[in-house]
Amino acid sequence: MTETTAVSHSTPLDRPKRGSFGVPLPNVKAAIIEHEGTDFLPVGEVGELILSGPNIMQGYWKRPDSNQESMLTIDGELWLRTGDLVSMDEEGYFHFFDRKRDLIKYKGYSVFARHVEEVLYQHPKIKAAGVVGVPDPKVGNLIKAYVVLESEARGQISEEEIIEFCKEKLAHYKVPKIVEFRGELPKTDVGKVSRRELREEGEEA
């Protein structure tokens, strides 16, 4: 991140850990707080990564609204909100989980898009999937799944079948309410499904 002078964590050369982006650099403080609050979370729980240290910016130039959104003070210490949802293990290694902006709010529940996507990928006929929240005045956001089927399954599986599959594996509030089949999904520069583009499509609709 530019706000961290490029780097905040690094993996020790002699002790790499699969799936982790490492431990904080010397003099950098890293903590995890509630994604909707400022209480610190214990080891193993997923929350928002915040950072403090000499390499962390003091604020955005002439952008008070952005500062209010991205910076917070806890016990007199200035912290940067990264917008990343992560966890920390017992050895102090940090593990990325998701982006905070991809958290879906449905009827007061917080739903991680990643949780729903992981279930969709368990379906043997689903090739790719992306899950986003689309605005709804009654519930906040409806959970919508964009799905690409394997070529031999196209036209053979209905939206209702995908929803029923999810009902067997997810809590009721995590089940997609809308399923849309696509021939392909937009991708990011690194080849991941672009939830941002899907979310923008849903908001425009």
Image (spheres, rainbow, N blue to C red):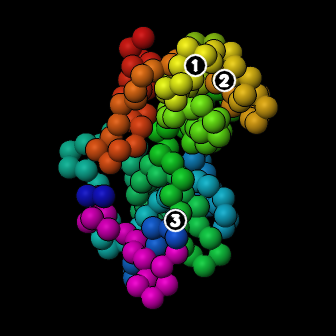
Quadrant containing the C terminus in the rendered view: top left
Amino acid under disc 2: Ile
Q: Look at the image and give the residue range highlighted in magenta.
A: 3-17
Residue farthest left in this picture: 61
Secondary structure of the residue carrying tag 2 is helix
User: Circle 2 sits on which residue?
Assistant: 162
Secondary structure of the residue carrying tag 3 is loop
Mark 2 near mark 1, Cβ–Cβ under 8 Å?
A: yes
User: Circle 1 sits on which residue?
Assistant: 179
> Could you say where residue 118 lies in the image, as x and y percent from the top left?
61, 42
Toward which corner of the image does residue 63 lie, by quadrant?
A: top left
User: Circle 3 sits on which residue?
Assistant: 19
Q: Main secondary structure of the magenta part?
A: loop
Residue farthest front in this picture: 152
State the separation of the CA atoms marked 2 and 1: 8 Å
State the separation of the CA atoms marked 3 and 2: 29 Å
Residue plotted at (51% across, 34% down)? 127
